[in-house]
């Protein structure tokens, strides 16, 4: 799909960050930026809220609390866990800013989340030290290095023989909110197996074809959403009644009418779900059959 194969704007400087002198030079570079992410995941923004903060690092670089994200648009981007005003949550910020700022913001929140939730070694329980300018936590007790982790989750647009789209409503969502189906990948499970399992569990549908589309990091708190389109082998829906409360098939006209009547609310524009639904509505979603 158009744009989903982009290499990205953020150079994470995997080799350069191993050089403490190089990192220190980036810290004092007047073009560098220091972002702040608070305990609720809100990130520092400019006064108008239309872009990320342009605050320059000051004081001494502290390796245990200042983390280098990488280089974006020629500038080194650092992040720290701290409150800042003005600030914005990712869901409100991402629709307002460009691709480069979205990539930096998601990386910043994800990295701060990881450091906040994983300070101890998962093997021996010792407190770990931050190394590699923020991308590694080293255990001095057992010598093990730990790296940021993402939890893979599939999200799938299911279409039937008439090219209708299945949308479901989770019990925990506000009335009227609907989206395509999603779920986490289980241990020892392939992505495709997860698609088949989750769809069967939540909707009772068997699938005849599955095709990968693209992905989106979603740090709530550390998910990686992997998008698919799938063809249902039938049309009879039987929701699980636990996670999915109800679901139905929509033609494009059905969905437009339901939105106009305020019967259905779709995911926000920052999400991969909205992007996939948008491609289906435009007729540009690839067919599940490769």
Image (spheres, rainbow, N blue to C red):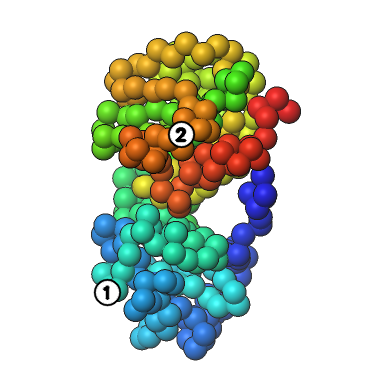
> SS of the residue at dot 1?
loop
Q: Position of residue 204 (x, y in %)?
A: 45, 13
Q: Position of residue 187 (x, y in %)?
A: 47, 27
> In which quadrant of the rendered view does residue 58 lie?
bottom left
Q: Residues within 10 Å of mark 2 (few under 14, many from 20)?
A: many
Whether residue 130 sits left or right of residue 16 in the image: it is left
Q: Which mark is residue 85?
A: 1
Whether residue 279 sits left or right of residue 175 in the image: it is right
Q: Which mark is residue 255?
A: 2
> In which quadrant of the rendered view does residue 134 lie?
bottom left
Residue 247, visible in the rendered structure: yes
Whether residue 117 sits left or right of residue 197 in the image: it is left
Q: Position of residue 7 (x, y in %)?
A: 66, 57
Identity of the residue furthest to the bottom in this view = 30
Whether residue 247 sits left or right of residue 11 in the image: it is left
Task: Please identify the quadrant where the C terminus is shown.
Answer: top right
Residue drawn at 27 percent across, 28 percent down? 171
> In which quadrant of the rendered view does residue 289 lie?
top right
């Amino acid at each position: 799909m158009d744009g989903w194969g982009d290499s990205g704007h953020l150079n994470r400087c995997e080799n350069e960050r191993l050089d403490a002198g190089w990192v220190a030079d980036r810290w004092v570079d007047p073009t560098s930026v220091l972002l702040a992410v608070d305990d609720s995941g809100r990130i520092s923004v400019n006064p108008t809220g239309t872009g990320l903060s342009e605050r320059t690092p000051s004081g001494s670089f502290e390796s245990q609390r200042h983390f280098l994200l990488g280089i974006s648009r020629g500038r080194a981007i650092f992040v720290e866990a701290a409150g800042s005003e003005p600030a914005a949550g990712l869901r409100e910020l991402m629709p307002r800013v460009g691709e480069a700022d979205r990539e930096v913001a998601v990386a910043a929140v994800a990295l701060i989340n990881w450091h906040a939730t994983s300070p101890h070694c998962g093997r021996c329980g010792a407190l770990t030290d931050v190394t590699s300018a923020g991308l590694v936590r080293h255990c001095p007790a057992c010598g093990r290095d730990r790296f940021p982790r993402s939890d893979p989750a599939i999200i799938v647009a299911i279409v039937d023989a008439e090219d209708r789209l299945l949308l479901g409503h989770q019990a925990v969502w506000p009335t009227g909110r609907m989206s395509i189906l999603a779920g986490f990948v289980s241990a020892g499970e392939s992505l495709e197996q997860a698609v088949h399992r989750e769809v069967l569990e939540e909707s009772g549908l068997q699938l005849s074809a599955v095709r990968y589309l693209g992905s989106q990091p979603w740090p709530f708190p550390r998910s990686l959403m992997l998008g698919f389109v799938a063809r249902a082998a039938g049309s009879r829906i039987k929701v699980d009644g636990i996670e999915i409360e109800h679901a139905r098939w929509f033609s494009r006209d059905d969905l437009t009418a339901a939105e106009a009547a305020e019967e259905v609310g779709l995911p926000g524009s920052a999400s991969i779900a909205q992007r996939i639904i948008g491609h289906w509505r435009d007729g540009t979603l690839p067919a599940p059959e490769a």
